[in-house]
Image (tube, rainbow, N blue to C red):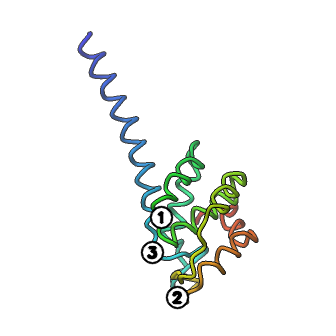
């Protein structure tokens, strides 16, 4: 009986640990995004991996903390996804992160529908600031 209790406790701890690791993995994948895209992309109009990862992080109760932690090691595309999430769901955190942002001149790969282009980070940041991507997160995933 006692051994079964110990095994149950250990297994429940492993489950919590595995769930936490899975959530951190999604935040890491989001931070590592190679391109920035919302809405249907490509010929099939599929949701981008970055948008899917952002939505998964935003479902977590600690979403804001995960996004802020991931920001420190994010690619430029990852930074944009994180900023969209914070802009939509935690404006105070968004303002804090944006005020400390370096705003590089680099271009970011962007997919809009079937078109892939490179756009200036600063321009995309302006679009995030204007809330142009917020509505995508209000729509149900397909």
**What's the residue at 70%, 75% (across, down)?**
127
State the CA–CA distance, disc 1 to disc 2.
21 Å
Circle number at residue 116: 2
Q: Residues within 10 Å of mark 1 (few under 14, many from 20)?
A: many
Q: Residues within 10 Å of mark 2 (few under 14, many from 20)?
A: some
> Which quadrant holds the C terminus?
bottom right
Q: Which residue is mark 3?
A: 34
Q: Position of residue 88 (x, y in %)?
A: 70, 59
Q: Is residue 88 left or right of residue 45?
A: right
Circle number at residue 35: none
Based on the displayed image, in which of its 4 quarters is residue 129 positioned?
bottom right
- In this rendering, is residue 13 above or below 37? above
Q: Nearer the viewer, residue 12 or 25?
A: 25
Q: Earlier in the sequence, mark 1 or mark 2?
A: 1
Q: Earlier in the sequence, mark 3 or mark 2?
A: 3
- In this rendering, is residue 67 above or below 76? above
Q: Position of residue 78 (x, y in %)?
A: 51, 67
Q: Nearer the viewer, residue 40 or 58?
A: 58
Q: Name the front one of labels 1 and 3.
A: 1
Q: Position of residue 91 (x, y in %)?
A: 72, 54
Q: Earlier in the sequence, mark 1 or mark 3?
A: 3
Q: SS at mark 3? A: loop
Q: Are marks 1 and 3 in contact (CB under 8 Å)?
A: no
Q: SS at mark 1? A: loop
Q: Which residue is mark 1?
A: 74
Q: Nearer the viewer, residue 11 or 124?
A: 124
> Which quadrant holds the N terminus?
top left
**What's the residue at 60%, 49% (across, down)?**
64
Q: Name the front one of labels 3 and 2.
A: 3
Q: Position of residue 45 (x, y in %)?
A: 55, 79
């Amino acid at each position: 009986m006692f051994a079964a209790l110990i095994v149950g406790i250990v297994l429940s701890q492993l489950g919590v640990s595995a769930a936490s690791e899975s959530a951190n993995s999604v935040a890491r994948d989001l931070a590592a995004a190679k391109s920035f895209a919302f809405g249907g992309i490509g010929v099939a109009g599929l949701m981008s991996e970055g948008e899917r990862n952002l939505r998964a992080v935003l479902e977590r109760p600690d979403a804001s903390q995960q996004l802020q932690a991931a920001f420190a090691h994010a690619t430029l595309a990852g930074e944009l996804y994180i900023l969209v999430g914070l802009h939509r769901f935690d404006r105070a955190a968004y303002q804090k992160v944006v005020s400390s942002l370096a705003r590089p001149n680099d271009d970011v790969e962007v997919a809009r529908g079937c078109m892939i282009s490179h756009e200036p980070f600063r321009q995309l940041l302006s679009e995030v600031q204007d809330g142009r991507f917020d509505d995508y997160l209000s729509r149900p995933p397909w």
